Amino acid sequence: MNLNSLFKTLIFTVLIVCCYSVTAQNSGLVQDSENQPIENVSVFIADQGILLKTNKLGEFFFDSKLPDNTYLNFYKNGYVSKLVKYKEGIEFVVFLKKLHVALDEVGVVESYSDLGNTKLTNIDKKSLENVFLRDNSMVESITQLSGVDIVSSGLGIQKVVVRGLSGMRVVTYLNGMQINNQQWANDHGIGFTDLGLGEVELIKGSSALKYGSEAIGGLLFFKDSPFTSNKKMNGYIASKFDNSSFLSSSQFGLNWKKNNFFFNLYGQYSISSDYRLPNNDYLFNSRFNQNAIKFSVAHRYKNLQNIFRYQYHYENPGIPAHAHVNPADINIEDITSSSFDFNDAYKLLTPYQLVNNQLFNYNLNYLSNNLKLSLHLGHFINNLKEHEKWTRPAFDLTISNTQITPNIRYKIKDLTFNLGSQLSVLDNKNNEDERLVPDASTLNVGPYVILDYEKNNFGFNSGIRYDYKHLKSEDNISNVNYDNEFSNTSFSSGIYYKFLDNILRFTYSGSYRVPHFSELFSNGVHHGTNRFEVGNENLDIEYADQFELKYQWANEHFGFVINPFLQNISDFISIVPADTFIDSYRLYNYKQYNNVEIKGVEMNLHYHPHQLHNLHIEQSYTFLQTKNKDDQYGLALVPANSIKTKILFDLNDYERLVKYKFDYISFYHVYKFSQEDFAEYEELTESYSLINFQIGLKLSDKLLCTIGINNLLNKEYSPHTSRIRGVAGGVPNPGRSFNINLKHEF
């Protein structure tokens, strides 16, 4: 062999080795404990928001080289999810352990989170991928988590309650941008639906330093479904119908990839009439309609990723049980109807709300082996109108929020540093002379630093955040001239230890909340709540301290979680009724209580009998007690203690049933204890029990169907957290209803 041939052979060999090396480092394998490949495992590249799937051989492939320490989340039903850090040059084989109980929603199973290390921070998770098929609404789905409930004004207006707190104390984020729709009052919903969402993460209490100090009650962090790596367009169309309110709703979704670009597109339209009560009457003006569209595009080039998202949401909920008198003086016949007319069932009636939300999000991410740089830019526009009697709105307010959030994450061996800041500018502008709150602006700057240490089975974290907030209002129409500055420090520390199958976590956090300008400046009729609200410019900062312990244990068939907590809030801001009426509306004033105590315990039990592989039992218990130490009463609109039980029969093991397209049968039971822990101006709520039933059908590999019955026993009940519970002796929630839901994937 001459020198030239030898050189060509050497070059060819090097190329083969390099190609093999690239292939090896851009692919991986997922196996079970018996070294058998696992097909259709979801491989989520967390830092990039991209989803891969394993093939029949358990293989998955990257489109490009990944930086070291990139988080990969592996999950599939029936297996323990696993969080793995990518390392170049190491054979990438991941083993998943079979697990028949799924405890990821209560934080047992390790996974990636935007809110922090799931081992060190108490983070609950809830998948939202199939909410449209399996639940009435996104908010009702979230209430299946322990410690979570709902405040509602009928079906069209729903918001989340976390450990007895809601509104401005429960902060909502969507893809990194704060959403300000639900913070005004109990008659304002969350401001979006499950459209295009993948999951929600929840931190209960005041330990969410990265996303602000206001989350004294908790923080909800909603995330879109990931981008797909499939070059072929994927998508779905879905529809649902409910006979209680003749609800009709449809969705579609599309996702695809082109070169280094990733695309997601979603749309939704929903319409509902008045809902039917257990006595077959209809609650007048409980109707609503919604429509939304959202679009996302991402571009990845080497270590850089750009993501742009846009979302438009419109909703038009009616305001039921409305009258210009004391709600207790209303007769149930005044707000219900025994007849139903399809010609008028969906027409717009006063009073009602018109809500238009637009959300713009931009993310820039840079990834290297030990470093992640991220920059989030967001702009949220919320236009809210309330119509009482006339074409001209009685209330017309536009809220705009601009947010800039840079963050640096750097890892040194077992230490991870998070350094960042939030800058937000919030403006509210009245579009009519008639106004409940004045024109105002809020500037907030919040730098923070968080340290995580994790080695073997031990870890701790600690963080601190400083916030400066400037509130200003110059409104001649409202006769308001206000200029004030607030500042304070929030902190959180936690420790984690794992021994055998046991996990123990302790967290202590302190936070504060600056009064909202609606609490400071409100002065007028709020038609949505049917009251005259007056603010208090002398309100000061709320302070909250929280202690929390969480113990978790799980094996192949059984899982258990217990989570006691204690929270003290000083200078608690509340709105309370007076014995005075202004223009037929009851007067409500904002005031502060010296000290409020919230304590309780949450327990979760998941069981899968060894002898019956297709049976899954999940149960949660929530005990909550609130006390206003000024008057020894409880807080307003606090949910009653509850036991929630879900029983799921997986029918795929039965050939005969599979032949007839049966997939599963589920029962969901909720028992609410009587609520005797209530505010001074509230009344006792009796206990009640609810049962929901659902059958899942797999009509084909691509066509899914669910048929369900809600409130199976047609129970007449009114939750303590219902805003219209005090009207006409208590307006019930919907009676028995039948629903059918279809989803076709392609």
Image (cartoon, grey):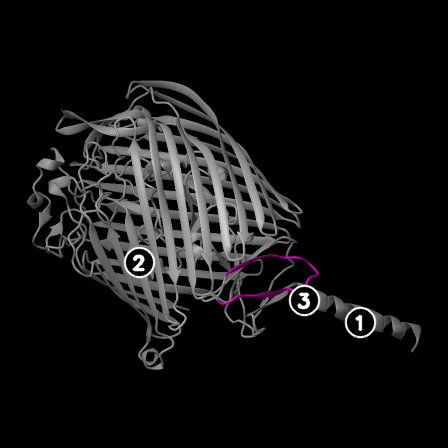
Alpha carbons under labels 2 and 1: distance apart: 62 Å
Q: Main secondary structure of the magenta part?
A: loop
Alpha carbons under labels 2 and 3: distance apart: 46 Å
Specify the segment rendered in magenta: 81-98
Query: On the rendered structure, is 90 left or right of 409?
Result: right
Mark 3 burial class by Cα count in 10 Å: few <14, some 14-19, many 20+: some
Can you identify the residue that label 2 sits on?
645
Q: Earlier in the sequence, mark 3 or mark 1?
A: 1
Amino acid identity at mark 3: Ala
Specify the label residue 13 is tagged with.
1
Q: Position of residue 285 (x, y in %)?
A: 16, 46
Q: Position of residue 300 (x, y in %)?
A: 59, 54
Confirm whether the magenta stretch covers residue 88. Answer: yes
**Is residue 397 visible to the viewer in this orientation of the structure?**
yes
Specify the label residue 24 is tagged with.
3
Q: Secondary structure at mark 3?
A: helix
Q: Secondary structure at mark 2?
A: strand
Amino acid identity at mark 2: Thr
Amino acid identity at mark 1: Thr
Q: Position of residue 248 (x, y in %)?
A: 25, 59
**Is residue 438 visible to the viewer in this orientation of the structure?**
no
Q: Which numbered disc, 2 or 3, marks the residue closer to the eye?
A: 2
Residue 359 picture quarter:
top left
Alpha carbons under labels 3 and 1: distance apart: 16 Å
